[in-house]
Structure formats: structure tokens, C-alpha cells
């Protein structure tokens, strides 16, 4: 089965793309098996970055961010947003980094009643 995001060929029984980490189309029984998936992707991104693969790391950071948002996992979203913002800042994309961080940071700092 080819990944709908990156077109990577994957085994027919795969749940996630082995290249970009995107969820492959199939029945989704629930989140119990993937509760920490956004963080696992973020850590894989970090390892790619340490190897010098900034482009690959950015793709996986975006997949991790998407996964955290689908799960409404704000802590994972904040961690991934912070990591991606650091990458973008290092690439001179300061505005993009700020635009990414501001909404999730505001969610944590805005007082809710």
C-alpha cells in the first residue's frame, strides 16, 4: 500500500508509513495502541536532525504535529511545536516558528474559567 502523503510503498498490513509516519488508510480501532505515537515521531525527528537530515526531520515533525492535533494531545503538540520551531529558527524562518508556537503556547497560558 502506498502512503497517501509521501507515496512510499509499505507492506499491506502496515498501520503507518515507514517513511513519513503518516497513518495509512484502514479501520482505526482507537488510540490505545498509539497514545505516545506523536512523541515517538518527535524523537525519530530529533535523531534524523542529529544525523544532519533537516528535511527528513521537518517532514516527521509535521507528521508528529498532525498526529498530536488529531489526538488533541496538547502536551505532545507543544513539545513538537517547540522542536519544529527551533529547527525553523535555525533555518532563519523566525516568523514561521513564532506563528507555529503562538497558538499552542497561548492555549497553555490563557486562563480558562
Image (cartoon, rainbow, N blue to C red):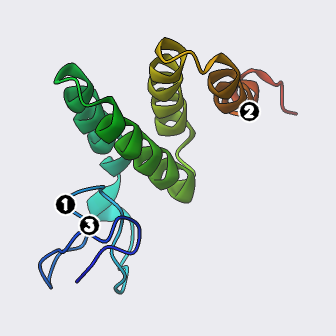
> Which residue is painted at 88% across and 33% down in the image?
113
Separation (CA) of disc 2 from disc 1? 30 Å
The percent position of residue 106, horizontal first and vertical second, equals 76, 26
What residue did someone put label 3 on?
A: 16
Tell me the element at label 2. helix
Q: Residues within 10 Å of mark 1 (few under 14, many from 20)?
A: some
Q: Nearer the viewer, mark 2 or mark 1?
A: 1
The percent position of residue 1, horizontal first and vertical second, equals 22, 83
Separation (CA) of disc 3 from disc 1? 6 Å
> Which residue is painted at 52% across and 46% down in the image?
73
- In the rendered view, would you say 108 is above or below 31? above
What residue did someone put label 2 on?
A: 103
Do callouts 3 and 1 mark residues in contact (Cβ within 8 Å)? yes
Q: Nearer the viewer, residue 56 or 66?
A: 56
Q: Earlier in the sequence, mark 2 or mark 1?
A: 1
- In the rendered view, would you say 55 is above or below 49? below
Q: Nearer the viewer, mark 3 or mark 1?
A: 1
Location of residue 28 (image quadrant): bottom left
The percent position of residue 4, horizontal first and vertical second, equals 39, 75
In the displayed orientation, state which residue is furthest to the right.
113
What residue did someone put label 1 on?
A: 18
Amino acid at each position: 500500500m502506498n502512503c497517501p502523503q509521501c507515496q512510499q510503498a509499505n507492506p499491506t498490513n502496515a498501520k503507518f508509513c515507514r517513511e513519513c509516519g503518516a497513518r495509512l488508510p484502514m479501520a482505526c480501532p482507537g488510540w490505545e495502541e498509539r497514545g505516545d505515537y506523536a512523541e515517538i515521531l518527535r524523537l525519530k525527528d530529533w535523531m534524523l536532525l542529529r544525523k544532519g537530515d533537516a528535511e527528513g526531520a521537518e517532514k516527521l515533525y509535521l507528521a508528529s504535529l498532525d498526529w498530536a492535533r488529531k489526538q488533541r494531545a496538547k502536551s505532545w503538540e507543544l513539545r513538537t511545536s517547540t522542536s519544529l520551531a527551533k529547527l525553523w529558527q535555525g533555518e532563519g524562518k523566525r516568523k514561521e516558528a513564532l506563528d507555529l508556537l503562538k497558538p499552542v503556547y497561548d492555549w497553555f497560558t490563557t486562563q480558562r474559567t
